[in-house]
Structures are given as structure tokens and as C-alpha cells.
């Protein structure tokens, strides 16, 4: 298993998260997440009363949620199977996450359950996965049976609780074989290696380039549906995205594809842009003036939405879909093919900003910090080295905006921070430096780290620590605390700060060290803060006025005791520079 070598090298996960490390690793692979640490801070729910939910991940942008239960065998041997009872635990998880009243849910998972349910009600979530993640082989028939039963039960439960919302539920075993497929997919490899005959109209033509060849033809809609029914998302292993469904409002295009093939099957070839697939090889045999095509291996790199939409039509009529099968064994060219074939996909807000002069300058400023990676919104084909700390551009924007006065927008409008001209110019002004990004981003990461410390204390948490942990478990707590800490900075430094954009650490060479500096400050401020900040989060972080009022109260209390605790602040203050 190639993935095991990569996973074992992920000390950023294994040292912090223990038995949950593999679960987070699988989540990151499957959804190509950059800042898994920030996500873990919100999504991990593993604890004494988690109701069999080790993780609840909700992504409103993609319309996907994952509820997961993990199992890690410490010394796995060939032939070891995962225990079936762990799969059945997902039934318990489903019963709690779809509870009629989230207020009755244990505090350990309450906030994530509220987020999931509100996301379903607003049609922001259309697909929910229940994962059983483990590091063993996937040959236990009991698990397959348990998951099939659980999937049916969960679907019925969702239908009863949310009758007006279109949500699909899948129960998935994520063991060695599945994680290996996701690892290969992240490396843009073809995971389906079977050889099979393609159902075509018996006509087509071949083009040959210097480092590639291609066969252009059409495929039967029924043949395409058969492949999707057989291989599911493995069919899109080289694609930047899988099928996104048709129930969400944003997927009206997929609904249109379904309507076209149902109502105008004879015209579908002319109405659809078609599919591009990478294959390991193809063979064309001409018999009685008819061409027969067989392929070896396949990944659809463009056309996932067409494939998924067609495959979700119950009664499919005869129709043809344009397709080209490409053979190429040069990695750089494959990456170019994948990238350029997906230029028409949804453009992220950060894509549109990635080449402006501010982002170009910031990338050059980050160059000396060899252990940090800041993309400036630019998506590349090569995954950054895992030895580097990856600064997610959206979390960067959130941290900057919250630190400089607007934690409510930072929390509630993540994508708008890059999309809105006004917000973007406020967050990324000409004066912004790489060192200030490190300063604010490391504060966000320190809050995540402190929450994890409290979580891992579990039953050993003191009464005060328990209240702090409950606060940090609420939606919006990180952005509100980040804002509050920024307002305390003059008291921390002991002098006036004329320009908060100039705040930075004297030494940025060790990212872990600056996180530790922030954590000492968080431990000092949070005991003054949580009781005043907590009421602001009663219904989520929504009120700028309440946030400012609560933060000002904390600043007043903190300032009153700074002379007494000055020795505790000295180390931090001496490590920071400003004007």
C-alpha cells in the first residue's frame, strides 16, 4: 500500500491526533483539503460522549457532509479484518445527528449537529456520507451487511426529519483499499485498470500527437451509466471533482442535463459538450467496415457532471454522448490535459485574484520561509510538500479580517472574502506583508491547538478548562476570540500601536515556536474572556455590535490586571515588533 508510507510520514497528523489521524488523512485525501488542522478543530468530536461520532464534517460550499467512526489497529497483520460492531455504531451516530431537537444532543457534538441540520434545511447539503474508517482489509461481510442496513435506516430517518429537502445518504467502508484508491486519485492516477469493450456507433477517428494519442467517437448513454453504476466515484479518479448531484440549487445544470436526455435523447449528442477520458491504452479492430473499440483503464477527467446526471435517470432511452479517449504517459502533459479540460469548471473566487500584484508580491515574500507554503490563491498541479506548513488562502483571509475588526463577516462569508472587491481590498491592502500573515494565521492555528489540548485532556479538564472548551466548541468561537485577542494587543505590548498591520514576530523561522507564543497568551486572556464572549454565540456569530461590546468588556478586564501579570506577558511582547 503506497498510502501507508505517505501516512506514516504525516507526523503533523500522527503526533497530534493519535487514533484519529487516519480519519483526518482520509478526509483530506478525499476532498483535497489544504488546512486539515483548522478543519479538525471544528470537525473532530471524538470523546467520552460523542455518540459514536468521531468526526462531523460539513462543507456548505460543496454540499457534502461526513459523519465518521474510526478504528486503528496498532499492529495490523495481513488478513486482519475490521470489527463489525464498529460499523454498526454508525446507526447510533445517525440517530443522534438527525435528532428532532439538537438541544437534546450531548454538548460534545451539539454544535456540529446544529450546523449539519441547519445546512440541510437551507439546501446547502445534498450528500451525507457515513464513513467507517480503518487501517485493515475490506473483506468482512458483516461490515458490508451492517453498512447496507445502516444506509437504508439513515435514508428513511432523513426523509422523516427533513421531508422537504433532497438529501442522499451513503454508508461507506473506508479501509486500506479505498484509502489507496484516494491516494492514487490525489496523484492523478487511473485507479480503474479493467479492460472492456466500448459501446460506440462503430465510427470514429484517431489523432496522434508527439506524446499522446486519442480516439474520438461517441458512447452509448446506457454504456456510460453501466460504468458509473459499477465503479461510482472511482470513474473520476483523475478529475478535480466528482459528480455534485442534482438536488442543490447550484446544480441546475445537472438537472438540465437530465431533462435533455429524458426529453430529447436523439438530440443529446448535439446538445452536450461531451466527455474526455484518460485511458492506459485502447485498441481499434475493424471488422466488415465496422470499428470496434476496447480500452484498458479509464478515468473521466472532464464530464463527471454529464456522467452522473445521465446515470441518475431511472429509465434511460437510447442516446449518444461525444467522447474522446486519450492515452498519455507523460506526467506533465497529463497535468496540463486535466487542467485545461476543466477550465470551464466553476472558478473559485481566489482563482480570479491569484495573479494580482499583491498576491504575486506576497508569494515572493514567502519564498525565504522554506517551511511555509502560501499559494496566494493559485491552484497548481503539484501538491506542496507535506514537510511544509500550508497556509490555506481562505483561512488567511478569515484571520486577517477577524484580527482587523470584523469577525462576523470573517466567519459567515468565507468565500466572499476573495470574491467581493471591497472585502478583498480591505483584507489584502498594499501594506500587507508575509510576516503579518504569519502573525495572524499562527494566532488562528494556536486557538485550534489550544482547543485540541483541552479536548485531549478529556476527563482531566478542570472546571475552568471545561468552560473554556465548551466555548471553543461553539460555531464562530475562533473568529470571535481572534478578534478579542487583537483588541488586547496594546495591553499585551504595554504601549500604543499606531498601525496594527505592522505587527509581526521578530523571528518567523519556526512556525511551531510562534504558535507556542500565542498559546501562552491565549491561556492568559481566555479565562477573562469566555464568560463574556459565550453569550454572543447563542445563535451563531451574527452580531457585530454584540461582538464588539463583549470584546471591549474583555479588554477592560484584561487591561485592569496587566500590571499584575506583566511578567507573564513579557516573553510574548519581546518577540513582537510593530510601529
Image (cartoon, helix red, strand yellow):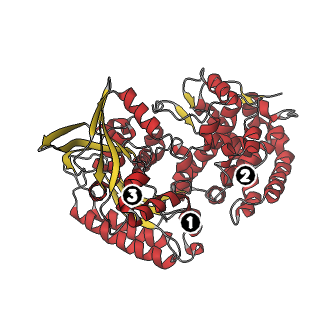
320 above or below 289?
below
Quarter of image, res 142: bottom left
First of labels 2, 3 by sequence position: 3
Residue 337 position within the rendered picture, expressed as x and y whole percent measured from the top left: 41, 34
Tell me how far mark 2 sits from mark 3, CA to CA.
Answer: 46 Å
Q: Mark 1 and mark 3 in contact? Answer it, CB < 8 Å.
A: no
The foreground one among 31 and 530 is 31
Label 3 neighbourhood size at 10 Å, few (<14), some (14-19), many (20+)?
A: some
237 above or below 58?
above
Label 1 neighbourhood size at 10 Å, few (<14), some (14-19), many (20+)?
A: some
- In the image, which is nearer the foreground, mark 1 or mark 3? 3
First of labels 1, 2 by sequence position: 1
First of labels 1, 3 by sequence position: 1
Q: In the rendered view of the protein, which quadrant contains the C terminus? A: top right
Task: Determine which of the numbered discs, if any, sits on residue 409 in the image.
Answer: 2
Left or right of 85: which side holds 429? right
Task: Determine which of the numbered discs, if any, sits on residue 123 in the image.
Answer: 1
Tell me how far mark 1 sits from mark 2, CA to CA.
Answer: 21 Å
Q: Is residue 94 visible?
A: yes
The residue lying at 54 percent from left, 33 percent from top is: 389
The residue lying at 46 percent from left, 33 percent from top is: 383
510 above or below 532?
above
The single residue placed furthest to the bottom in the displayed view is 160
Residue 443 position within the rendered picture, expressed as x and y whole percent measured from the top left: 67, 40
Task: Determine which of the numbered discs, if any, sits on residue 267 in the image.
Answer: 3
The foreground one among 407 and 329 is 329
Left or right of 164: which side holds 516? right
Q: Mark 1 and mark 2 in contact? Answer it, CB < 8 Å.
A: no
Residue 464 position within the rendered picture, expressed as x and y whole percent measured from the top left: 67, 57
Amino acid at each position: 500500500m503506497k498510502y501507508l508510507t505517505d501516512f506514516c510520514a504525516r507526523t503533523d497528523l500522527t503526533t497530534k491526533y493519535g487514533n484519529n489521524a487516519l480519519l483526518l488523512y482520509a478526509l483530506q485525501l478525499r476532498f483535497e483539503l489544504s488546512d486539515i488542522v483548522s478543519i479538525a478543530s471544528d470537525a473532530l468530536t471524538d470523546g467520552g460522549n460523542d455518540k459514536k461520532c468521531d468526526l462531523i464534517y460539513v462543507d456548505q460550499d460543496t454540499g457534502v457532509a461526513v459523519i465518521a467512526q474510526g478504528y486503528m489497529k496498532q499492529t495490523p497483520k495481513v488478513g486482519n479484518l475490521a470489527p463489525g460492531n464498529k460499523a454498526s455504531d454508525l446507526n447510533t451516530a445517525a440517530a443522534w445527528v438527525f435528532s428532532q431537537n439538537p438541544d437534546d444532543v450531548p454538548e460534545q457534538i451539539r454544535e456540529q449537529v446544529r450546523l449539519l441540520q441547519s445546512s440541510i434545511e437551507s439546501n446547502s447539503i445534498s450528500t451525507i456520507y457515513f464513513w467507517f474508517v480503518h487501517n485493515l482489509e475490506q473483506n468482512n461481510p458483516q461490515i458490508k451487511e451492517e453498512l447496507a442496513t445502516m444506509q437504508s435506516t439513515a435514508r428513511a430517518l432523513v426523509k422523516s426529519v427533513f421531508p422537504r429537502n433532497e438529501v442522499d445518504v451513503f454508508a461507506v467502508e473506508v479501509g486500506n483499499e479505498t484509502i489507496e484508491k484516494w491516494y492514487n486519485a490525489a496523484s492523478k492516477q487511473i485507479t480503474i485498470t479493467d479492460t472492456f469493450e466500448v459501446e460506440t456507433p462503430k465510427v470514429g477517428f484517431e489523432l496522434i500527437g508527439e506524446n499522446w494519442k486519442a480516439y474520438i467517437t461517441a458512447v452509448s448513454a446506457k454504456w456510460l451509466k453501466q460504468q458509473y453504476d459499477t465503479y461510482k466515484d472511482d470513474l473520476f479518479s483523475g478529475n478535480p471533482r466528482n459528480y455534485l448531484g442534482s438536488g442543490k440549487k447550484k446544480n441546475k445544470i445537472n438537472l438540465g442535463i437530465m431533462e435533455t436526455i429524458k426529453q430529447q435523447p436523439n438530440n443529446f449528442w448535439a446538445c452536450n459538450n461531451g466527455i474526455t477520458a484518460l485511458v492506459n491504452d485502447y485498441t481499434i479492430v475493424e471488422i466488415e467496415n465496422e470499428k470496434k473499440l476496447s480500452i484498458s483503464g479509464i478515468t473521466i477527467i472532464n464530464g463527471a457532471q454529464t456522467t452522473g446526471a445521465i446515470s441518475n435517470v431511472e429509465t434511460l432511452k437510447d442516446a449518444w454522448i461525444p467522447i474522446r479517449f486519450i492515452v498519455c504517459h507523460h506526467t506533465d502533459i497529463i497535468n496540463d490535459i486535466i487542467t485545461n479540460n476543466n477550465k470551464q469548471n466553476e472558478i473559485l473566487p481566489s482563482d480570479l485574484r491569484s495573479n494580482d500584484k499583491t498576491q504575486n508580491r506576497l508569494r515572493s515574500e514567502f519564498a525565504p520561509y522554506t517551511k511555509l507554503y502560501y499559494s496566494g490563491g493559485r491552484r497548481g498541479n503539484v501538491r506542496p510538500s507535506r514537510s511544509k506548513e500550508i497556509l490555506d488562502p481562505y483561512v488567511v483571509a478569515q484571520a486577517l479580517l477577524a484580527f482587523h475588526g470584523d469577525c462576523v463577516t470573517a466567519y459567515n462569508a468565507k468565500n466572499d472574502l476573495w470574491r467581493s472587491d471591497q472585502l478583498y481590498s480591505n483584507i489584502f491592502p498594499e501594506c500587507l506583508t508575509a510576516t503579518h500573515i504569519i502573525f495572524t494565521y499562527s494566532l488562528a492555528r494556536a486557538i485550534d491547538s489550544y482547543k485540541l489540548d483541552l479536548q485531549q485532556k478529556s476527563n482531566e479538564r478542570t472546571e475552568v478548562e471545561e468552560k473554556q472548551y465548551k466555548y471553543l466548541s461553539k460555531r464562530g468561537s475562533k473568529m470571535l476570540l481572534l478578534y478579542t485577542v487583537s483588541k488586547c494587543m496594546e495591553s499585551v505590548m504595554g504601549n500604543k500601536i499606531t498601525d496594527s498591520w505592522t505587527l509581526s514576530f521578530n523571528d518567523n523561522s519556526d512556525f511551531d515556536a510562534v504558535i507556542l507564543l500565542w498559546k501562552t497568551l491565549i491561556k492568559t486572556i481566555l479565562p477573562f474572556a469566555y464568560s463574556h464572549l459565550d453569550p454572543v454565540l447563542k445563535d451563531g456569530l451574527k452580531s457585530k455590535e454584540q461582538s464588539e461590546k463583549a470584546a471591549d468588556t474583555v479588554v477592560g478586564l484584561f487591561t485592569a490586571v496587566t500590571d499584575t501579570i506583566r511578567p507573564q506577558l513579557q516573553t510574548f511582547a519581546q518577540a513582537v515588533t510593530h510601529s
